Amino acid sequence: MDNPSVQIQGLIPADPSPWEVVPPGEAQATQTIEAALAALVRAGAANGPARRDAHPKAHGCVRAEFRVLDDLPSSLQVGVFAGSRTYQAWIRFSNGFETPQDDKIGDARGMAIKLMGVEGSSSGTQDFLMINNPTLFVRDAIDYVAFQGATDHPLRFFFPSWNPFTFRLRELWVMRAIISQTVTNMLNIRYWSVTPYLYGDIPCKFSAKPAGPAFAFNETVGPNFLRDNLAKSLNAAEATFDFCVQLRTQPESMPVEDPRIEWREADSAFIPVARITIPKQSFETQEQTAFCENLSFTPWHGLDAHRPLGGINRVRRTVYETISRLRHDINATPREEPTARTPL
């Protein structure tokens, strides 16, 4: 397989921004998360290849084009959206749970986008990571440590004591919203970045909305029906998404440090800034599957104009880098960022 690529050179610098407030204990909590997830990856690798600690089950990794829209207002011509152009991209669709499971089980569904040929990015790429819900069920690193500590008895995270003032009802509501969704085709649902980013000098969130007619392949037979339906859909027709940005207009109701809270579209609408086109294709070759599983996605691949914001993204910067290096070391595979579409 001819894979034009370069070694990963780095991430967006971790300098603090004026919108962020780092809570006490975040550094220690991040170290705890990092150690726990590294142990999870090592344990899983005892019976096979090392997998991602989250979103390990891929439904498919596909070639795509990401076209910045013509005639955007000057205020929206920022970063990768500065000027009309088309990026070649890879998109990986996945389940969120830490180990692969039957697609019938309620789970977060992920859409990870990697743009290539991004000038000014130290990795040469720009990653956008999204799931099929606008909010998360943890606020920050400290909350995530508490969630990890309750994995054997998940209700302990939501109800840590008999004291009703300790109940995490908002978190429970978000979790139920995620796992209760019925998803039968990854091309028919909407995705959100959940966490905030910069759009030049304004915090924002991103979303991808299906832009064409819904696909009719929605069978739920077998444990991998989401992959089957994705393959059938892209054998039949191309898929399109509108990639949109939501600018922060109400600081009080649109927090940077709390991804449990949805930024209401009534306060700031999502504005289309690009069109994603996934052409008809067959993506199930062994070479393409191996290539895509070796890719590393992180919100810290990209331009400083789209710098990740907030505590969850700060945790991701450290943890995603550690897990990516560990996974590739165990699997004895090179850690590379693609610079052009791989001819598979």
Image (cartoon, helix red, strand yellow):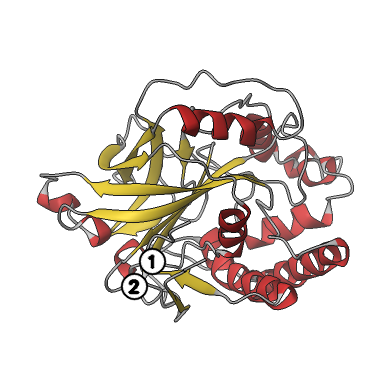
Q: Quadrant of residue 208?
A: top left
Q: Secondary structure at mark 2?
A: loop
Tell me which residue sits at (76%, 33%) in the image: 223
Residue 189 can be seen in this image? no
**What residue does disc 2 label?**
121
- Residue 298: image x %, image y %? 51, 63
Nearest to the observer: residue 255 or residue 314: 314
Q: Is residue 317 above or below residue 105?
A: below
Tell me which residue sits at (60%, 54%) in the image: 289
- Residue 11: image x %, image y %? 45, 75
Tell me which residue sits at (39%, 47%) in the image: 64
Left or right of 3? Residue 230 is: right
Q: Quadrant of residue 343?
A: bottom left
Figure label count:
2
Left or right of 167? Residue 334 is: left
Left or right of 210? Residue 104 is: right
Q: Are marks 2 and 1 in contact (CB under 8 Å)?
A: yes
**Mark 1 residue crowding within 10 angstroms, few (<14) / some (14–19) / many (20+):** many
Q: Quadrant of residue 133?
A: top right
Q: Is residue 18 above or below residue 197?
A: below
**The residue positioned farthest toward the top in the image shown:** 216
- Three-letter amino acid code of the residue under disc 1: Thr
Instruction: Kindly identify which numbered label has been placed on residue 125.
Output: 1
Q: Secondary structure at mark 1?
A: strand
Nearest to the observer: residue 125 or residue 146: 125
Nearest to the observer: residue 105 or residue 87: 87
Disc 2 from disc 1: Cα separation: 6 Å
- Residue 153: image x %, image y %? 88, 45
Tell me which residue sits at (14%, 45%) in the image: 72
- Three-letter amino acid code of the residue under disc 2: Ser
Left or right of 71? Residue 172 is: right
Residue 30 can be seen in this image? yes
